[in-house]
């Protein structure tokens, strides 16, 4: 009887086999996505055959009123949740083909996250927060990688500080460094400036956009700030369970 294939090895094989090529190179490809939730005896349909395609290397914004389903869509894109219908393909991999453990590994290695409230681990230093995922994967020279990123976000001198000693803007810069530490194909940013003043928020957006573009990575931001749309390549508007696409200010 053949030995079982470890999830990590199978995930690598799945990703290699599904790696995109050619001109139609999309980091995100959602087709006919359905998502429903039970609310007591009723069923609420959040996504109703939603389609979304974002080119590799693009910076996009996801907008929609509160409750429209933006968080639901991010959960599907990151593999935290599964759709009730349709397909979700991220970085060339169909997430529906993966087990829960494989989706966790995929998310850890191919998707970076920046949250509104930073989500730093309070008991870890700044450097330890940045290298957290690298340590989980046993990545070589995690310390050197963390130091280089902290230098890039101008926080090398705070490497040994704990998050509660940092301002909101500094904590978000740490979060950006952490999101990029494992060189993900896609960064998801959920209201990354929502807890910051306008000046600090603009600096954070400048940094996040620059660092992802320089690396040739893709960035999808959830935002309520219409001025943010001037700096993105594509805008996805979510309403009534469907997604419409329009050019951003950088298109």
Image (cartoon, rainbow, N blue to C red):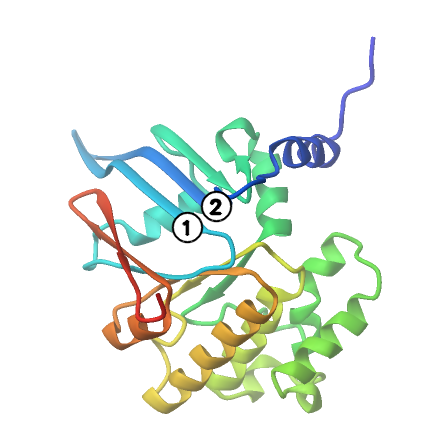
Which residue is most to the front?
Answer: 23
Q: Which secondary structure, mark 2?
A: strand
- What whole-number distance in Å separates the C-alpha atoms at marks 2 and 1? 5 Å
Q: Residue at x 58, y 65 (%)?
A: 179
Reply above or below: 162 against 113. Answer: below
Can you give x and y, in whole percent of width and height, for residue 189 in the image? 43, 64
Residue 88 found in image quarter: top left
Residue situated in front as seen by the camera: 19 or 5 = 19
In this picture, residue 75 sits left or right of residue 109: left
Q: Residue 72 appears at what percent x and percent y?
A: 33, 47
Image height of 35 relative to 55, above or below: above
**In the rendered view of the protein, which quadrant contains the C terminus?**
bottom left
Q: Is residue 170 left or right of residue 142?
A: left
**Is mark 2 in CB contact (under 8 Å) with mark 1?**
yes
- Residue found 45% across the figure and 46% down from its top: 28
The numbered mark at residue 237 is none
Front residue (pair 176, 17):
17
Q: Is residue 13 left or right of residue 69?
A: right
Residue with the mark numbered 2: 26
Q: Earlier in the sequence, mark 2 or mark 1?
A: 2
């Amino acid at each position: 009887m053949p030995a079982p294939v470890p999830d990590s090895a199978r995930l690598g094989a799945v990703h290699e086999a599904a790696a995109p090529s050619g001109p139609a190179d999309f980091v995100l490809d959602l087709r006919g996505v359905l998502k429903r939730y039970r609310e007591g005896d009723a069923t609420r349909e959040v996504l109703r055959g939603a389609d979304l395609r974002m080119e590799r290397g693009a910076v996009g914004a996801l907008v929609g009123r509160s409750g429209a389903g933006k968080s639901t869509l991010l959960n599907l894109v990151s593999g935290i949740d599964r759709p009730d219908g349709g397909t979700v393909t991220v970085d060339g991999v169909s997430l529906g083909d993966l087990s829960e453990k494989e989706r966790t590994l995929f998310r850890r290695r191919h998707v970076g996250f920046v949250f509104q409230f930073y989500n730093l681990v309070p008991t870890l230093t700044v450097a330890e927060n940045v290298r957290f995922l690298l340590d989980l994967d046993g990545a070589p020279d995690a310390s050197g990688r963390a130091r280089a990123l902290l230098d890039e976000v101008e926080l090398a001198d705070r490497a040994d500080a704990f998050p509660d000693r940092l301002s909101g803007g500094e904590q978000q810069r740490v979060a950006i460094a952490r999101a990029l530490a494992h060189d993900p194909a896609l960064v998801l940013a959920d209201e990354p400036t929502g807890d910051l003043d306008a000046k600090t928020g603009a600096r954070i957006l400048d940094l996040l956009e620059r660092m992802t573009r320089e690396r040739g990575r893709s960035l999808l931001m959830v935002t309520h700030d219409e001025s943010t749309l001037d700096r993105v390549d594509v805008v996805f508007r979510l309403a009534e369970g469907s997604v419409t696409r329009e050019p951003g200010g950088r298109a």
